[in-house]
Amino acid sequence: MRLGASIVGDLRKVLADEVRAGERAAMTAIRAETEQVKAELRRQVTTAFSGNARGIANAWRSKIFPRSGQSLRPAGLVFTKVPNVIDAFERGALIRAKGGGKFLAIPTGFNAARGRRGRGEKGMRVTPAQMVTSGQAFLRPFKSGRGFVWCLPLRQGEQTGRRRRTRLVAGGVTEVGTANRKGREAWARGLLEQGMVPMFLLLPQVKLAKRLDVRGAAERGLRRLPGRFVAAWERESGRAA
């Protein structure tokens, strides 16, 4: 028995069409997988740090190569604009003071005028140098003996505005908050009774918890990519059901 086979049409054109379909499929697969990996990494950040880390999450960016045209060998790049932060929380880094210093100075939530940056001098955090030059800063040791709370004396400023907001001023250096009688007056009174506001935590070192899995996201993307490419090629060549 003899079997015969023949190709209908121009072989070179058939092959060229198949290559072009493969190029389009490769670009589609890489583009989709790159976006999925980036989205997963952004979710990791927002899940680990809640809504406070939206800027860090959005620092994950992506690029596709080639930037224009088609290719059977495309590449996707996912990168972050804050690599040191990401690396520290992926490894669970141990952070120590630089230059032989004994302590890290970690600003507390009180250490921001009106709780916000970007308002000129009123929006900047008090620095350790300002704490020293103020001549009013003092230390309170932790019960564990492993560090200190670096404080400034707190006083009540004038009440301003129609809502009678009470200004809270730390050591004459910065305004650390306001209170009104309906919402935060008890909070303000509690701070005033203590007579101090914690501006920095002084710790010899900090061990960050491992909160991110960048390598895992990349490996999952690589495992998905072949199946995504085959499905896209079948669609492009018209073989998909």
Image (cartoon, rainbow, N blue to C red):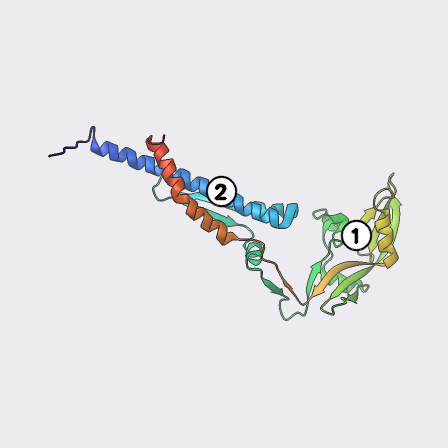
Q: Residue furthest top?
A: 9
Secondary structure under the numbered disc 2 in the rendered image? helix
Residue 163 in sight in this render: yes
- Say above or below: 147 vs 82: below
Q: Nearer the viewer, residue 134 or 198?
A: 198
Q: Nearer the viewer, residue 96 or 118?
A: 96
Coordinates of residue 50 in the picture (x, y in percent):
64, 47
Which dot marks residue 176?
A: 1
Among numbered discs 2 and 1, the one appearing first in the sequence: 2
Q: Quadrant of residue 31?
A: top left
Coordinates of residue 120 in the picture (x, y in percent):
72, 48
Question: Is label 2 in contact with label 1 (beta carbons under 8 Å)?
Answer: no
Q: Nearer the viewer, mark 2 or mark 1?
A: 2
In the image: residue 206, left or right of residue 130: left
Which dot marks residue 36?
A: 2
- Which amino acid type is marked by label 1? Val
**What residue is drawn where x is 39% and y is 42%?**
227
Q: Residue furthest left?
A: 1
Give the number of callouts. 2
Q: Quadrant of residue 127?
A: bottom right
CA separation in Å, label 2 and label 1: 42 Å
In the image: residue 36, left or right of residue 74: right
Query: Dot 2, how many residues are within 10 Å of its Cα: few (below 14), some (14-19), or many (20+)?
Result: some
- Which amino acid type is marked by label 2? Gln
Which dot marks residue 25?
A: none
Residue 56 in sight in this render: no
- Say above or below: 75 vs 100: above
Quarter holding the N terminus? Answer: top left
